[in-house]
Image: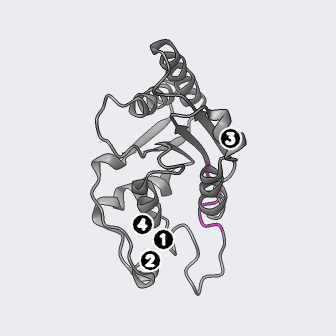
Amino acid sequence: MPRHIAIIDAHPDPDAGRFNHSLVRAYAEGAREAGHEVHVIELGQLNFPLIRSKADWESGKIPPALERAQDSIAWAEHLVFFYPLWLGSMPALLKGFLEQVMRPGFAVPAPDDHRRKLLAGRSARIVVTMGMPALLYRWYYRAHSLKSLERNVLKFCGIAPVKETLIGMVEASSAGAHRKWIGRLRALGRAGA
């Protein structure tokens, strides 16, 4: 059954030659081939301010550059986040984006709101690329930043289940390994998973 899928391409570098962007294109192509509707949000193309106060977080307006992104998240049944691991975590651009779009009243309850999990009914996949071996990140570092995104942002807002794809040794991988991953992401896109 076709799904509404919002893809958040969170690589800060807009250079189309980045491997991360190739993975995004493969997933989106696979999804569209299977009849899914897809919106792609390219954070590297957006310019928006950071939230700097509690008042802005609670009652500020979402920047105009992010209104369509927030609409796409509201529309989506499945969210797919793509980002490179930077300093052991998500790039600051993705964190700033999440703080802007996942505001009270949209993703989390406003202070006087008794509703919970405002984005329930959606699922997600997180695709993380990194220079280190993926098993090292998962087992030695316990994928701490990935788990934080899953638990403290997505699941807190009601998004579940959340699945993950970790792609390690990106800079040291061969062209054949890159093609293999592109094929895997295209298949995940077809499946809407």
Q: Label 4, on which residue? A: 100
Q: Point out residue 14 in the picture as x, y percentages from the top left corner.
A: 29, 40
Judged from the image, the secondary structure of the residue bearing numbered disc 1 is loop
Q: Label 3, on which residue? A: 138
| Residue 193 visible, this orientation | no
Disc 3 residue crowd, few under 14, some 14–19, many 20+, Cα 10 Å? some
Label located before the other in sequence (1 or 2): 2
Q: Are marks 1 and 2 in contact (CB under 8 Å)?
A: yes
> Which amino acid type corresponds to the residue marked 3 in the rendered image?
Arg
> Which amino acid type corresponds to the residue marked 4 in the rendered image?
Gln
Label located before the other in sequence (2 or 3): 2
Disc 2 residue crowd, few under 14, some 14–19, many 20+, Cα 10 Å? some
Label located before the other in sequence (2 or 4): 2
Q: Are marks 1 and 4 in contact (CB under 8 Å)?
A: yes
Q: Label 1, on which residue? A: 103
Most common secondary structure along the magenta stretch: loop
Disc number for residue 57: 2
Looking at the image, which residue is at 49% across and 25% down?
30
Q: Which residues are magenta?
A: 117-123
Spatial separation of the CA atoms under disc 2 and disc 4: 8 Å
Q: Is residue 126 left or right of residue 29?
A: right
Q: Nearer the viewer, mark 4 or mark 3?
A: 3
Judged from the image, the secondary structure of the residue bearing numbered disc 2 is helix
Q: Are marks 1 and 3 in contact (CB under 8 Å)?
A: no
Q: Point out residue 189 in the picture as x, y percentages from the top left corner.
A: 54, 30
Looking at the image, which residue is at 57% across and 85% down?
111
> Which amino acid type corresponds to the residue marked 1 in the rendered image?
Arg
Label located before the other in sequence (1 or 3): 1
